[in-house]
Amino acid sequence: MSPDIFYRRNLPHIHPEGHAFFVTFSLLHAIPYDVLEQLKAERQNELRQADLAQRYSIQKKHFGKYDEWLDRCENSPRWLGEPDVAAIVANEIERMNGERYTLIAYCIMLNHVHLLLEGLLATSARHRGHGKISAHRHAALAQRSHRARVQPCAEKGRAVLAAREL
């Protein structure tokens, strides 16, 4: 089976048609710089010494380490906990649904966002500048009367928004 979309940035990205994938993005400085560098170095070290069969489990383990640091919110900006900021992010995620991807669900945390997507619909050119919104667009989104419903999770005071019922 050939991939539906293939593009290159730092690494090749392959998005097979009909498969869901999980994306996490965070605010700048959500993980302290020294910790981020240490995590990167550990991951690269393990990957250098691993054979192909071990790579997935190493990637999965290190994703967990990054996610643990994001959940800690130690000295991290927490802008996404502000309802107006969360609404801007939620509106943008929902706006791109059907344009760049099929959105299954998303979760807006205090300093990062998780997305569950099905099949990217964009071409490689549309990925350039992904996540960058002009100040004008921010202002326009902030003016909208629609406000995202931000509800704290039972644990760690997380803000959660769901795209649709699963």
Image: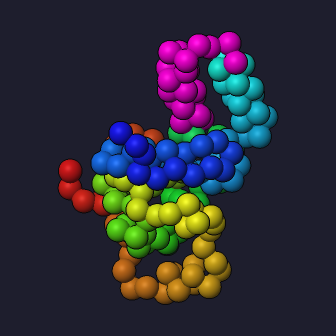
Classified by dominant secondary structure, the portion drawn in magenta counts as helix
- Magenta highlight range: 48-69
Residue at position x 59%, y 13% from top?
51
Q: Is residue 164 visible?
A: yes
Q: 154 or 13: which is nearer to us? A: 13
115 to 133, vertically: above or below: above
Q: Residue 159 appears at what percent x and percent y? A: 42, 54
Q: Is residue 39 left or right of residue 123?
A: right
Q: Residue 163 appears at what percent x and percent y? A: 30, 60
Q: Residue 80 appears at what percent x and percent y? A: 53, 59
Q: Is residue 35 visible?
A: no
> Which residue is farthest left?
165
42 to 162, vertically: above or below: above
Residue at position x 60%, y 73% from top?
133
> Which residue is farthest front?
2
Q: Is residue 111 magenta?
A: no
Q: Residue 149 appears at what percent x and percent y? A: 34, 66
Residue at position x 62%, y 14% from top?
50
